[in-house]
Image (spheres, rainbow, N blue to C red):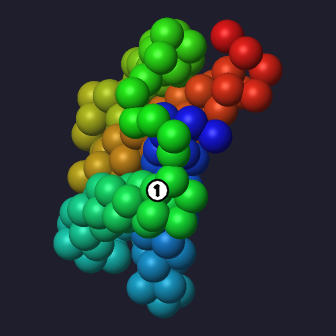
Amino acid sequence: MSYTEKGTWVYLLASLGVWLGYVAFLLQRRDGGPLDEVAYVGPLLWSVGISVLASTVGRVLFEVVRPSDSHLADERDRDIDRRGEHVAGIVLGVAVVCPLALALTEAEHFWIANAIYAAYVLSAVVGSSVKLVGYRRGV
């Protein structure tokens, strides 16, 4: 497994795992009341920070446990990354329509902020998945 493929796995798992934890946290704090009344700003900011930290630390730990032969990306790695980022950008562009529509209809900030976060996570998951398929099946 190449260095960049390992990083893709870590990014996928960190992004999705932290977001799922954030959603579970919100649902737990809801306590039977309306979801948009939960204090979400702090937990959302913490989850973004934790996601970045988990991705960085996870990549280092993965590299310690299973070192790569080389940390240099070759042409195949660059092509796979380019394709994955292209698809992720398209997904993000389409997914941002939802928070935009929420903003235009003057929805609660809770829903707009969480729709933006969900769009980012969807983009990360789809982009990473495209990259991992590229590594397994070829470009």
**Number of numbered discs overlaid on the protein picture:** 1
Identify the image quadrant of the C terminus: top right
Q: In the image shown, does 93 or 72 lie closer to the viewer?
A: 72
52 lies above or below 40 = above
Q: Is residue 56 above or below residue 139?
A: below
Residue 136 appears at what percent x and percent y? 76, 28
**Residue 128 visible in the shown view:** yes
Q: Position of residue 82 (x, y in %)?
A: 46, 13
Quadrant where the N terminus is found in the figure? top right
Q: Position of residue 23 (x, y in %)?
A: 49, 67
Is 90 drawn above or below residue 32 in the view shown? above
- Residue at (29, 49) in percent of width and height: 113
Residue sitting at x 51%, y 40%: 69
Residue 53 in the figure: left or right of residue 92: left
Residue drawn at (38%, 59%), measured in percent from left and top? 60
Where does label 1 land, which residue? 63
Q: Residues within 10 Å of mark 1 (few under 14, many from 20)?
A: some
Residue 44 appearing in the image: no
Q: Position of residue 135 (x, y in %)?
A: 67, 26
Residue at 20% in and 72% down: 42
Q: Quadrant of residue 92?
A: top left
**What is the residue that sits farthest to the right in this orientation?**
137
Picture layout, residue 127 above or below residue 77 = below
139 or 68: nearer the eye? 68
Task: Determine the residue located farthest toward the bottom in the rendered image.
Answer: 31
Q: Secondary structure at mark 1?
A: helix
- Front residue of 126 and 96: 126
- Residue type indicated by callout 1: Glu
